[in-house]
Amino acid sequence: MNLDIQHKNALVCGSTQGIGKAAAIQLAQEGVNVTLVARSEDKLKAVLAELPNDNQNHSYLVADFTNPTDLKEKLEATNLQFHILVNNTGGPAGGPVFNAKLEEFERAFTMHLKCNHVLVQAVVPFMKEENYGRIINVISTSVKQPLDGLGVSNTIRGAVANWSKTLANELGQFGITVNNVLPGATATERLTEIINNKAAKTGKTVEEVAEMMKNASPAKRFAKPEEVANAIVFLASERASFINGINVPVDGGRTKSL
C-alpha cells in the first residue's frame, strides 16, 4: 500500500528508544522528513544517524517535558511546519493510586497532557494551512481497562484520551485527525522496568513475571516496538484520512473490552 506521505514533515517525541524510535525510523522509510524530540542530545544524534535518508531533511530538538515553557520556546525557534505529530512520553512510576503523592500526579499531568497541548498548539496552524494534519498520541490500553499497579498512569492516560477525543471533534473540519494508539506490553525499556518492579514486590523471579504478562495476551508474547509503530505510521498517512477520534489497541488482544 502506498501511504502517500513522502515529503511530509513529522515531529516525533520520545524518539531515542522504544516505540518512538521505531515510529521515527518507519516514517523516514516512507519518505517523511523527521524531527526527533527527546532530552538527551547524544542519543538524538545517534538515532538521527540511523534514520533512512533519501535526500530527506531530518533533524532533532532537545527538550525536557517536565518544563512546558522551555518546550514552547524551543518550538517557537523552529519553523513549526509539521504535518504529523507523534506525542509519546515515558510513563509515570508504578504503584497503587492510593499511595501516590500529589507531586506524582502534577509531574505526570505536565509531561503527558500539558506538553502534548503545547505541541498541538504549535503545529496546528500550519496543519490548517495545509488542510492536512495527523496527531497520534501514544497512550496505553489503560484508557479502556485500568492496569493494576499503575495508578498514576491510569489516571493521567485517561485524561489524555479525553483531551484527544475533544481535539478530534474540534479539528476534524480542517483535515486534521487526532487518534490514540494504545500499546499493550511492548518489549521496551519501560516494560523491563515494570517487570523488575513487579518481581521485587511479589517475590517472583523476573522470568516468572514476564511469562505471566505474556500469558495475559492471546498472542502469548510481547509486542515489538515496530508492531506498534506500524499502527502509528498508518494513522499518519493519507490512507487514514477518515479515521478520527479513536483508540487503537495494539496489544495482541489482551484488552477485554471491545
Image: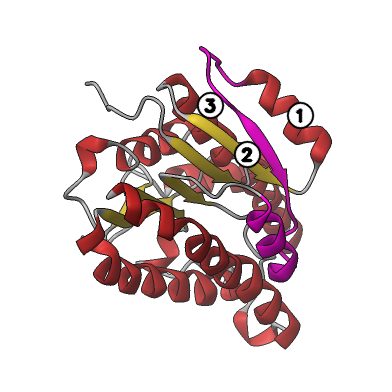
Q: CA distance from mark 1 to mark 3?
A: 14 Å
Which residue in the rendered view is the most extreme toward the top?
54
The type of residue carrying mark 3 is: Ile
Q: x, y percentage for residue 193?
A: 71, 50
Instruction: Based on the picture, tell me whether residue 60 belongs to the magenta stretch.
Output: yes
Q: Quadrant of the C terminus?
A: bottom left
Q: Which mark is residue 45?
A: 1
For label 3, the SS is helix
Q: In this rendering, does residue 257 appear at all?
A: no
Instruction: Pinpoint residue 133: horizontal percent, then vertical percent.
Output: 34, 50
* Residue that carries the numbered disc 2 in the rendered image: 36
Residue annotated with mark 3: 25
Magenta segment range? Answer: 51-77
| Residue 3 picture location, percent across and down | 27, 27
- Would residue 214 be counted in the magenta stretch? no
On screen, residue 113 versus residue 202, left or right, reads left
Q: Which is nearer the eye, 235 or 146?
A: 235
Number of other residues with Cα within 10 Å of mark 3, as a class: few under 14, some 14 to 19, many 20 or more? many
User: Compared to 136, does 101 lie above or below?
Assistant: below
- Which residue occupies the foreground of this view, 77 or 34? 77
Q: Depth check: 179 or 202 in front?
A: 179
